[in-house]
Image (cartoon, rainbow, N blue to C red):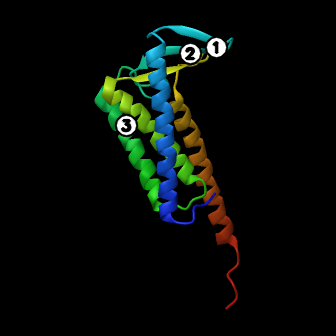
Amino acid sequence: MRPATRAAAWGGALAVAAIVVTIDQVTKAAVSAGIDRGERIEVLPFLDLVHVLNRGVAFGFLGGGSKGLVIAITLAALGAVLVWFALDVRRPWAWLAVGMLIGGAVGNLADRVRQDAVVDFIDFPAWPSFNFADIFISVGAGVLVLAAVSAAAREDREGARPAAPP
């Protein structure tokens, strides 16, 4: 879906970001209040709820890194996404991708600033624990790639069309 105006694109992205931050922070607060750190609750044979603190970035990467380094990487990635979006806010679905990425990053960044770690609680076997911010970041990255590829394909098709007669 292509937004009608720049304001609609930014408004959509910010609305999605606000929803993502809310979902992320409410679920993390519920887990922190209801599950002791290190506790594991089986929900389904392939899904547990846990309460762990992740000091790294996505799925524990850079877990031994400094808080400052992780925050710097997060801010640099956010800056790159915002610049990409600002260059052409009318790319189809880019507002959705950017909103999910901003919301997920802000949700995890809030945890990191508040407690030097991110609350993770969704746990599948043989996969690191994660949270809703991580889900939105992953889906947002996928939508971002699709939006970029779709925009590039559209530009190629439009560029390949013969010029209109004079």
Instruction: Report the amino acid beneath label 1.
Output: Val
Disc 3: which residue: 73
Residue found at x 44% / y 23%:
29
Of labels 3 and 1, earlier in sequence is: 1
Of tags 2 and 3, which is closer to the observer?
Answer: 2
The spot of residue 7 in percent (x, y) is: 47, 62
Where's the N terminus, which quadrant?
Answer: bottom right
Residue found at x 48% / y 56%:
11
Observer-nearest of 33 and 84: 33
Between marks 3 and 1, how big is the CA–CA gap?
A: 34 Å
Which structural element holds mark 2?
strand
> Label for residue 43?
1
Query: Mark 2 packing: few (<14 Cα in 10 Å), some, or many (20+)?
Result: many
| Residue 88 seen | no
Where's the C terminus, which quadrant?
Answer: bottom right
Disc 2: which residue: 49
Residue found at x 48% / y 14%:
34
Query: Mark 1 packing: few (<14 Cα in 10 Å), some, or many (20+)?
Result: few
Observer-nearest of 105 and 15: 15
CB within 8 Å, label 2 to label 1 = yes
Image quadrant where residue 141 sits: top right
Which structural element holds mark 3?
helix
Instruction: Report the amino acid beneath label 3.
Output: Ile
Of tags 3 and 1, which is closer to the observer?
Answer: 1
Which structural element holds mark 1?
strand
Of labels 2 and 3, earlier in sequence is: 2
Between marks 2 and 3, how big is the CA–CA gap?
A: 28 Å
